[in-house]
Amino acid sequence: MSTEPHIRLTALRKVYPGTGATPEVVALDGIDLAVERGRIHGIVGRSGAGKSTLIRCLTVLERPTSGAVVIDGEELSALPEGRLREARRRIGMVFQHVNLLDSRTVAQNVAYPLEVAGVPRAQRAARVQELLDLVGLGNRAGAYPAQLSGGQRQRVGIARALATEPAVLLCDEPTSALDSATTRQILGLIRDLRDRLGITVLIITHEMAVVREICDSVTLLDHGRVAEQGAVADVVAAYGSRLARELIPVPDLPLGEERQLVEVAYSTDDVATADVLAAVAALGTGVEVAAGTIETLAGRRVGRLQLDVPAADVAAALDRLHAVGLHAVVSSDGGAGTGSAVRATGAGVAR
Ligand SMILES: Nc1ncnc2c1ncn2[C@@H]1O[C@H](COP(=O)(O)OP(=O)(O)OP(=O)(O)O)[C@@H](O)[C@H]1O
């Protein structure tokens, strides 16, 4: 089996030229990304970080200014327009707003890409039924979009995206318009489809719940650059990770005078929780575990602890934690607590 990643971006750059008084915008500034076949990768970042530009460049609906987009070994960014149309059939797209044709039934909507691809009518019917069964809508083939819930419409959108048997599914904010229960169902469906069909999924999202629930790996974009990237548990356990704060939040807390917050993040692949707690306990009685969370992300256990440390002891505490191989940083949130006064000993160091 090839070791080439299924999706590879190399030094991808997109500059929107300025017009008149409007300066040029560097929307993507040297993005490298590799996603293995059958993985679910999340792209997250604030508004304006470059997520939509990235997804448009991936399908070459937008020509990158420089750099390469390679999917399934084929460099899409180097293909002429005619060959691109063919290559795009191997990429399914799922959007936040599904955009179904209201005058067509569910089955006719799913059949549409097959019609465009010239699949004969008899084969279309069987394929459409198979797709509807796959997304759990086997009994709604004759319904019209107006008769469906938001979650069902998104299922139709997913079935339609899978019609041409793509190897890659690009999802642009697929659950942003859905409530949390429906979001979980749709995410469960996407994971199930990945497991059954072996497709590679790239999800653009601003929802951390999406990353927490289904992503194997993640990229945090910031001003068109990769700020953090890797397997979810590795990113979270990395030194001073911004994503860790969002993916495994711990309560804000007010700090006493002359005290600072020190944050420890780890993966149990690297260090056992008991050893982390022992290292914390060894810092002495002046240090409290103010808050902590241990979660399972992409099948791996990751933890975050907030330590409430006397300001005078912070440097020594950091040294001692680093000496035992832990990632510890002074939290920049220190002292900016919301007054929630939560002083949970989530991990409870025995003293
Ligand atoms: N067609 C365009 N012409 C000029 N500038 C653009 C164009 N499209 C996007 N930009 C700019 O590129 C940058 C990245 O925009 P992009 O829409 O990719 O971000 P995003 O992360 O998807 O944001 P959001 O979450 O709000 O959709 C922004 O500064 C945006 O103003």
Image (cartoon, rainbow, N blue to C red):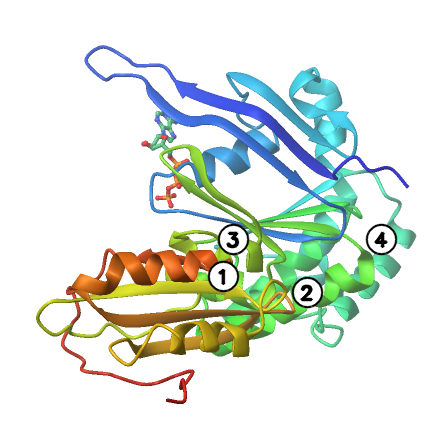
The residue beneath circle 4 is 124
Q: Amino acid at mark 2?
A: Arg
The residues bearing labels 4 and 3 have C-alpha atoms spaced at a distance of 43 Å
The residues bearing labels 3 and 1 have C-alpha atoms spaced at a distance of 20 Å
| Sequence-first tag of 2 and 1 | 2
| Sequence-first tag of 4 and 1 | 4
Whether residue 315 sits left or right of residue 164 in the image: it is left
Residue 177 in sight from this viewpoint? no
Mark 4 lies within 8 Å of ligand 1 (Cβ measured): no
Q: Amino acid at mark 4?
A: Arg
The vertical placement of 39 against 259, above or below, is above
- Residue at 73% from the left image edge and 45% from the top image edge: 36
The vertical placement of 65 against 73, above or below, is above
The vertical placement of 58 against 344, above or below, is above
Question: Tag 4's secondary structure?
Answer: helix
The residue beneath circle 2 is 191
Pointer 1 local density, CA inside 10 Å: few below 14, some 14–19, many at least 20? few
Q: Nearer the viewer, mark 2 or mark 4?
A: 2
Q: Nearer the viewer, mark 2 or mark 1?
A: 1
Decide which of 123, 339 is in the foreground and name it. Answer: 339
Q: Amino acid at mark 1?
A: Val
Q: Amino acid at mark 3?
A: Val
| Sequence-first tag of 2 and 4 | 4
| Position of residue 23 measured from the top left corner of the image (x, y, whole percent) | 25, 16
Decide which of 167, 61 is in the foreground and name it. Answer: 167
The vertical placement of 215 against 278, above or below, is above
Q: Quadrant of ligand 1?
A: top left
The residues bearing labels 4 and 1 have C-alpha atoms spaced at a distance of 61 Å
| Sequence-first tag of 2 and 3 | 2
Q: Nearer the viewer, mark 4 or mark 3?
A: 3
The residue beneath circle 1 is 324
Q: Nearer the viewer, mark 3 or mark 1?
A: 1
